[in-house]
């Protein structure tokens, strides 16, 4: 079996079935570090250690633009809600803004160290960023100015998570603590403590009642937001969990780990539905499409892979 073209799905009974990605997007010259769908699902953006961002037209599965401007590896990509602009960050201090054609708009300058996370707020006018300088900034995208700076972390900020109603912001990183904020006012809303190592990624449940976080611990932590207590831990990865993505309907969580596995979890039960492992470290980052029907993954093999969620779930079910 050609591992570069097929996938081994390890279902709960240990049976193996083969499946293929729906599309393979080639063009990057180094590891894929982040992937993001546009809100309408028409476009996919991928960032890489090769310092570039590529925009892919998902109707043709071809790259329409290569965004060049970062001087180091790209870390995060965020589309604006209207889907016509995107923000990218890297191991550099500036956040770069682009239009969907790949034209540079304006840089956002202010962080003292590399920027590791970025999210647009629902109005499209404000952007949230987290940095190795230990701060979170809220930017006015129209003016390029900083509206607020949120401080409280004792080490680098790796990730941000925003609830779908826009009322809860979570930030986490190397201090092993998840800090909670009201993004509208900058007010602190407490902290979640329990991780024994750095936190790499986090995402809210669809209703905002739970937060999923993961990192060097190897487990996915499930937090109850009402009590701010650890509810459970999802075990399946054997090391650092790099990336989390929630399906639009909130019924599934996808996680990608340094060991090269991608796991689809059923929610809220927390049971692993499928474990995907190609053996070539292809699964380092993951994102659900806006309609929940597709997954985009990227990894060390320099390829962006597109998967049909229904096909891989059906293949796993048929093997049981």
Image (cartoon, helix red, strand yellow):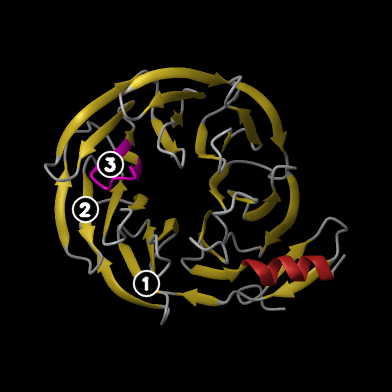
Q: Upstream in the sequence, badge 1 or badge 2?
A: 1
Give me the C-alpha separation between circle 1 and circle 3: 23 Å
Q: Upstream in the sequence, badge 1 or badge 3?
A: 1
| Percent position of residue 91, x then y | 31, 44
Q: Which residue is mark 3?
A: 127
**Occupied quadrant, residue 189:** top left
The crowd level at tag 1 (other Cα within 10 Å; few <14, some 14-19, many 20+) is many
Q: Are marks 1 and 2 in contact (CB under 8 Å)?
A: no
Q: Which residue is found at the position 29% from the left and 51% from the top?
A: 88
Q: Are marks 1 and 3 in contact (CB under 8 Å)?
A: no
Q: Is residue 195 above or below residue 313?
A: above
Q: Which residue is mark 1?
A: 56
Foreground: 242 or 1?
A: 242
| Percent position of residue 161, x then y | 45, 38
Which portion, as a residue range, is magenta?
117-129
State the count of labels.
3
Foreground: 237 or 11?
A: 11
The crowd level at tag 3 (other Cα within 10 Å; few <14, some 14-19, many 20+) is many
Q: Which residue is mark 2?
A: 97
Residue depth check, mark 1 versus mark 3: number of the one nearer the observer: 3
**Occupied quadrant, residue 309:** bottom right
Foreground: 148 or 14?
A: 148
Q: Quadrant of the N terminus?
A: bottom right
| Percent position of residue 213, x then y | 56, 35
Q: Upstream in the sequence, badge 2 or badge 3?
A: 2
Label placed on residue 242: none
Dot 1 lies on which element?
strand
Q: Are marks 2 and 3 in contact (CB under 8 Å)?
A: no
Dot 3 lies on which element?
strand
């Amino acid at each position: 079996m050609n591992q570069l073209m097929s996938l081994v799905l390890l279902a709960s009974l240990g049976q193996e079935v083969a499946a293929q990605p729906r599309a393979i997007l080639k063009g990057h010259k180094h590891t894929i570090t982040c992937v993001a769908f546009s809100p309408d699902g028409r476009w996919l953006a991928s960032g890489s250690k090769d310092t570039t961002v590529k925009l892919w037209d998902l109707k043709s599965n071809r790259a329409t633009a290569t965004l060049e401007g970062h001087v180091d590896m790209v870390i995060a990509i965020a589309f604006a809600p209207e889907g016509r602009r995107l923000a990218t960050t890297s191991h550099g201090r500036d956040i770069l803004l682009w239009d969907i054609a790949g034209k540079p708009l304006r840089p956002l300058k202010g962080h003292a160290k590399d920027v590791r996370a970025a999210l647009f707020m629902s109005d499209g006018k404000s952007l949230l960023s987290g940095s190795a300088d230990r701060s979170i900034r809220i930017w006015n995208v129209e003016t390029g100015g900083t509206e607020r700076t949120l401080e409280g972390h004792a080490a680098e900020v790796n990730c941000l998570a925003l609830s779908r109603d826009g009322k809860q912001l979570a930030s986490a990183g190397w201090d092993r603590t998840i800090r909670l904020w009201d993004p509208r006012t900058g007010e602190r809303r407490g902290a979640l403590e329990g991780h024994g190592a750095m936190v790499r990624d986090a995402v809210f449940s669809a209703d905002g009642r739970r937060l999923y976080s993961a990192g060097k611990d190897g487990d996915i932590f499930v937090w109850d937001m009402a009590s701010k207590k650890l509810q459970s831990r999802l075990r399946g990865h054997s090391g650092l969990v790099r990336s989390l993505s929630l399906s639009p309907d909130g019924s599934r969580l996808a996680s990608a780990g340094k060991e090269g596995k991608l796991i689809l979890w059923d929610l809220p039960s927390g049971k692993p539905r499928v474990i995907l492992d190609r053996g070539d470290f292809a699964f380092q980052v993951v994102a659900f499409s806006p309609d929940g029907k597709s997954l985009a993954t990227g990894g060390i093999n320099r390829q962006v892979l597109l998967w049909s969620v229904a096909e891989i779930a059906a293949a796993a079910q048929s093997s049981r």
